[in-house]
Image (cartoon, grey):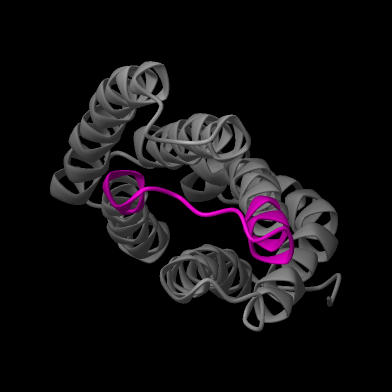
């Protein structure tokens, strides 16, 4: 990454990182639906790009923000995207484990996780858009969507507990499912923080 990067290039790089996070969620959704690990390496590569890019981009934005007050709200955004990428990496490993060890979710659990993945894809898409086009309506959408994801994830965890008690799911599948719910909440939270920082 060039040290003499200008504001436009810095924001485009940040946008690309956000886009990569969204692309990863699409890959993870497909991997989960088809119970395959073949797409996981593509996602790992995108996560590595974000992890490699973040430290230097953070430094560049900090330097640029000294002369450009418009950039001040962006100071912590690279770190939030990094946290999203780290959480995505955790889901990659969980899906990989699920495929390798032939662990299957119940139809209900699959429907619930797929629904939440789709919501995250929409949230991350909007979050990336906010990076380039700061917009109150988009920010409010992400805030409201995050609240919806948290509410659904809590509701799904309760329903899942009931299924576990009934014996309609295996404990090993249950552990992966519950961990995924926690990670999904964390990704939505970090996206919301970006939306709040960039709200006009």
* Residue in front for this viewpoint, 179 or 103: 103
Q: Is residue 32 magenta?
A: no
Residue 137 percent coordinates (x, y): 13, 47
Against 109, is 123 above or below?
A: below
Residue at the far front in the pictured view: 167
* Residue in front for this viewpoint, 95 or 165: 165
Q: Quadrant of the N terminus?
A: bottom right
Residue 188 percent coordinates (x, y): 41, 39
Q: Main secondary structure of the magenta part?
A: helix
Residue under the point 39% across and 65% down: 132
> What residue span does the magenta drawing correspond to?
94-110
Residue 134 percent coordinates (x, y): 30, 53
Residue under the point 44% across and 32% down: 185
Residue under the point 36% across and 41% down: 195
Against 98, is 186 above or below?
A: above
With 30 as the anchor, is 57 left or right in this view?
right
Tally of marks = 0
Q: Quadrant of the C terminus?
A: top left
* Residue in front for this viewpoint, 198 or 100: 100
Which picture quadrant has residue 143?
Answer: top left
Q: Is residue 104 magenta?
A: yes
Against 143, is 29 above or below?
A: below
Residue at the far left in the pictured view: 137
Residue 93 percent coordinates (x, y): 73, 54
Residue under the point 36% across and 32% down: 196
């Amino acid at each position: 990454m060039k040290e003499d990067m200008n504001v436009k290039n810095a924001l485009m790089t940040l946008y690309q990182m956000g886009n990569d996070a969204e692309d990863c969620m699409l890959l993870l959704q497909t991997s989960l639906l088809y119970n395959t690990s073949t797409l996981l390496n593509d996602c790992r590569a995108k996560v590595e790009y974000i992890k490699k890019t973040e430290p230097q981009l953070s430094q560049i934005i900090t330097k640029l923000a000294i002369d450009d007050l418009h950039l001040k709200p962006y100071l912590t955004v690279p770190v939030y995207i990094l946290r999203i990428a780290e959480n995505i990496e955790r889901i990659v490993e969980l899906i990989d484990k699920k495929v390798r060890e032939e662990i299957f979710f119940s139809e209900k659990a699959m429907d619930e996780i797929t629904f939440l993945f789709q919501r995250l894809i929409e949230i991350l898409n909007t979050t990336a858009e906010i990076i380039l086009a700061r917009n109150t309506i988009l920010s409010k959408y992400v805030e409201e969507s995050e609240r919806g994801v948290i509410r659904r994830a809590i509701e799904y965890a309760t329903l899942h507990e009931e299924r576990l008690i009934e014996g309609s799911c295996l404990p090993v599948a249950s552990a992966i499912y519950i961990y995924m719910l926690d990670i999904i909440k964390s990704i939505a939270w970090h996206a919301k923080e970006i939306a709040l920082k960039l709200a006009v």
